């Protein structure tokens, strides 16, 4: 079993578990007992960014958090299908293998389309959803995205990702709001990608923003399948990448949802304001479904 000497076990005191798929080991944690909550991370992160939420909720719920292949403590093969769609198929296989029933999905960043794809395919197995600073539609005609896409198309970007670990070293710290990420914690995000051969998963997610806009839109167009599911949106209002405009669109598409805005947080509310996020989730879980309509916290 691989030992990660850089891992801060005080910050992340969880037992490592593994699920093998396509000859690769997917790392996950499984803490607590009760109704299962499945956490799905984005980029350039891993299950580490949910650790404080899991610490608080695992006394009442069973908390399962995966690391996508290519991220965190999972394998990072040089040649692999790192597409967003394949990550969703892997999540589907994992949930089936673990025999998880009536689950709550907690999704952040790219975890949104990955988790929503699962929910749209298996609505009967999803009890409720929590969405943190994510998206679910094409941004191809959004002026801000069109401007951003010029950066994504620049051949220098994959070079920066692979040779300078650009995403966790530079982009991640810039995505925070009032509460900046301490250097000791930043190391927990950079070390999983310490070698350039371990950075293909991050590059693939960046490429997904260019290549998968039509797929995102197909997910959005199927949203009525989930219209009656209780959904909580937790949003860091200082997010410069996935701005509050995304929250407005989510709210229009899921009018029965609950919204919790965190004014001081940026793109990673679960890392920046974990107590607020955990409380918002706990309050939401305790609501009767009929009481969840049209509530804004």
Image (cartoon, grey):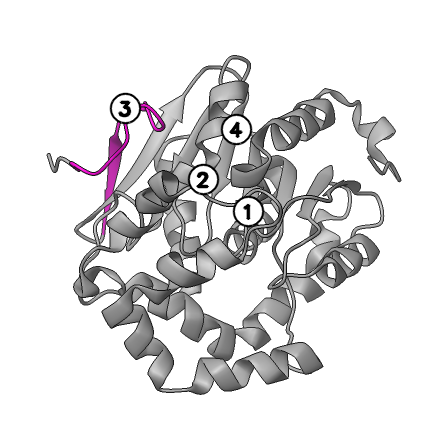
Badge 1 or badge 3: first in the primary sequence = 3
Q: Is mark 1 on a helix, strand or loop?
A: loop
Q: Label 3 neighbourhood size at 10 Å, few (<14), some (14-19), many (20+)?
A: few
Circles 1 and 2, Cβ within 8 Å, touching? The answer is: yes
Badge 4 or badge 3: first in the primary sequence = 3
Q: Name the residue under label 2.
A: 49
Which residues lie in the magenta part?
4-21
Q: How much space separates mark 4 and mark 2, taking CA atoms?
A: 9 Å
Nearer the camera: disc 3 or disc 2: 2
Residue nearest the observer in this picture, 64 or 192: 192
Q: Residue 225: percent from the left, percent from the top?
A: 70, 52
Q: Mark 3 points at which residue?
A: 15
Label of residue 53 in the image: 4
Nearer the camera: disc 1 or disc 3: 1
Q: Residue 181: percent from the left, percent from the top?
A: 47, 44
Circles 3 and 2, Cβ within 8 Å, touching? The answer is: no
Q: Is residue 65 magenta?
A: no
Q: What predominant SS class does the magenta segment belong to?
A: loop
Image-based side of 216 in relation to 81, left or right = right
Q: Name the residue under label 1.
A: 268
Residue at 57 percent of width and 75 percent of height: 213
């Amino acid at each position: 079993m691989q030992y990660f000497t850089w891992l801060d076990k005080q910050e992340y005191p969880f037992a490592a578990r593994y699920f093998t798929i396509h000859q690769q080991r997917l790392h996950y944690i499984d803490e607590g007992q009760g109704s299962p909550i499945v956490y799905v991370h984005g980029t350039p992160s891993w299950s580490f960014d949910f650790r404080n939420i899991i610490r608080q909720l695992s006394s009442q719920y069973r908390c399962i958090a995966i690391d996508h292949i290519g991220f965190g403590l999972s394998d990072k093969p040089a040649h692999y299908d790192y597409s967003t769609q394949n990550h969703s198929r892997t999540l589907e296989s994992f949930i089936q293998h673990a025999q998880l029933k009536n689950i709550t999905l907690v999704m952040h960043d790219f975890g949104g389309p990955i988790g929503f794809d699962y929910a749209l395919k298996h609505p009967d197995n999803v009890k409720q959803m929590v969405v943190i600073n994510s998206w679910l539609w094409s941004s191809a005609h959004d002026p801000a995205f069109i401007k951003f896409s010029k950066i994504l198309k620049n051949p220098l970007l994959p070079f920066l990702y692979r040779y300078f670990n650009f995403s966790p070293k530079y982009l991640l710290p810039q995505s925070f709001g009032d509460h900046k990420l301490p250097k000791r914690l930043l190391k927990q995000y950079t070390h999983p990608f310490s070698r350039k051969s371990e950075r293909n998963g991050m590059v693939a997610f960046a490429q997904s923003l260019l290549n998968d806009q039509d797929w995102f839109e197909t997910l959005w167009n199927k949203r009525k399948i989930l219209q009656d599911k209780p959904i909580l949106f937790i949003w860091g209002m200082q997010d410069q990448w996935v701005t509050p405009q995304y929250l407005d669109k989510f709210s229009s598409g899921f009018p029965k949802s609950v919204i919790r805005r965190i004014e001081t947080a940026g793109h990673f509310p679960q890392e920046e304001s974990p107590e607020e996020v955990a409380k918002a989730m706990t309050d939401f879980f305790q609501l009767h479904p009929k009481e969840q309509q049209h509530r804004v916290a």
